[in-house]
Amino acid sequence: MSQPRPGLPAKQIAAVVAGNALEFYDFLTYAFFATQIAHAFYPDYSPARGLLLTLATFGAGFLTRPLGAWIIGGMGDRLGRKPAMILSFALMGVALFGLALTPSYRSIGIAAPIIALGFRMLQGFALGGNVGPTTAYLIEAAPEGRRGFYASLSFASQDFSVMVAGIVGTALSYLLSPVHFNEYGWRIAFLLGASIVPFGLMLRRTLTETHDPAVDRDAPPLPLLPYLPVALFGLVLLASATISNYVLDYMTTYANDTLHMNTKAAFGATIVLGLFQVSADLVSGWLSDRYGRKRVMIIPTALMLLLALPAFFVIAYFRTAAALFAATAVLAALQGLGSSPILIWITESIPARIRSGAVSVIYAVSIAIFGGTTQATVKFLLDWTHNPLMPAWYASAALAAGLIAMVLIRESAPPRARTAQ
């Protein structure tokens, strides 16, 4: 079994984190511009149906994530973390350029949403193969006693991408007229991300490998049955975190489409969401090194379960930017604090020789089932019930299931974190 390699240069950790942030920026930007993308690819439908189809296309990107996890994540175990991360990043760049340059429905007809769907599925394939190698790399590169903090950089980079997408969306809403923003503002946001892809590839090529597959080639087969509980509990934990997270990621569209708030306020909520989640992710990783993964999962998740409905009530009742930002900040902080230790727990519970592939598949399967359906489900429930609190009810059900799993799992942190007071 390969051993951790602590003390890697900070610029190498930064290269991994920056690449992860860019991949998630590329994937999640689609959700934040869902209303505008609906105008481009589904203009002949009613606004509600066009948005639902756009969200279904967003969800299609999750269908290929398990396949990418199996192929690219497994490659991270067979060939090393570095080549797997380079491949996933390159494929994401191709998909992003392609999606940004896909002509509209009015230009090429039905071919437009079909092409967009193809590039969206390629994005999912690439991202599915990114999470396992990236998280494994950060765990293996961490100094003694800091695995939680290093692994939290993976979640923090994801949420940083949310904040950047919000800043880009807000800036474009100020710089462009409403007509131009709807027509091509989302394309500019995608192309900004795509322009950084070549630099990201150069950075990832400089990485020092943390896993040597040759060490494991002559080792006896690893029994997988002992790790089945990790996989099952991991699926439940990630489902809970994913549903609640994508409900929050829907906040921009929710404010814009359901509450009819202006675009600037809606994208402002995305900035608040990303800012508070990034800060909470890093604090969560540090706390989990000190107090253990379970404690840091359970307390924020329980608080979020208690506050989800009141927070959405405040947003829906007042419908002001102040109410939207304040409620989003509270939920985002709790989400970030409770979610980071989940991926840490899964990753350090699995041996290095199968870590990249196993983490990729567990993450991708859970995300494909629940992440890919969350926003379309929320939109359907809102249209069906006309109840603006439905996102909170849906998130609360997921949080309750996750909380039960958190109580049942065994602590995975080293003894120092288990006994710290």
Image (spheres, rainbow, N blue to C red):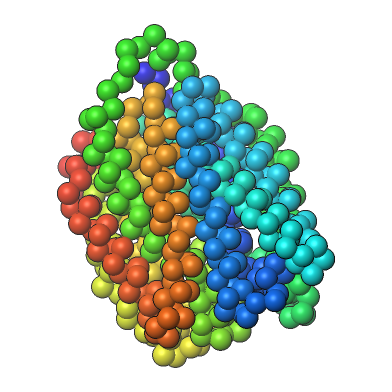
Indicate whether 82 appears above or below 34. above
- Residue ranking furthest to the right: 107
Q: How many marks?
A: 0
Comparing 73 with 11, the one in front is: 73
Residue at 63% of width from left, 68% of height from top?
A: 33
Residue at 26% of width from left, 46% of height from top?
A: 233
- Residue 374 found in image quarter: bottom left
Q: Where is residue 248 in the image (x, y as percent from the top left)?
A: 45, 68
Residue at 74% of width from left, 58% of height from top?
A: 111
Comparing 19 with 116, the one in front is: 116
- Residue ranking furthest to the top: 218
Where is the N terminus found, in terms of image quarters? Answer: top left
Is residue 145 visible in the rendered structure shown here?
A: no
Q: Give left or right: position of 76 versus 231.
A: right
Q: Position of residue 212 (x, y in %)?
A: 47, 18
Residue at 38% of width from left, 77% of height from top?
A: 390
Q: Give left or right: position of 151 versus 59.
A: left
Q: Position of residue 187 (x, y in %)?
A: 74, 62
Is residue 27 visible in the rendered structure shown here?
A: yes
Q: Give left or right: position of 383 versus 229.
A: right
Indicate whether 292 appears above or below 313. above
Indicate whether 230 appears above or below 407. above
Q: Position of residue 121 (x, y in %)?
A: 59, 49
- Residue 261 found in image quarter: bottom right
- Residue ranking furthest to the bottom: 318
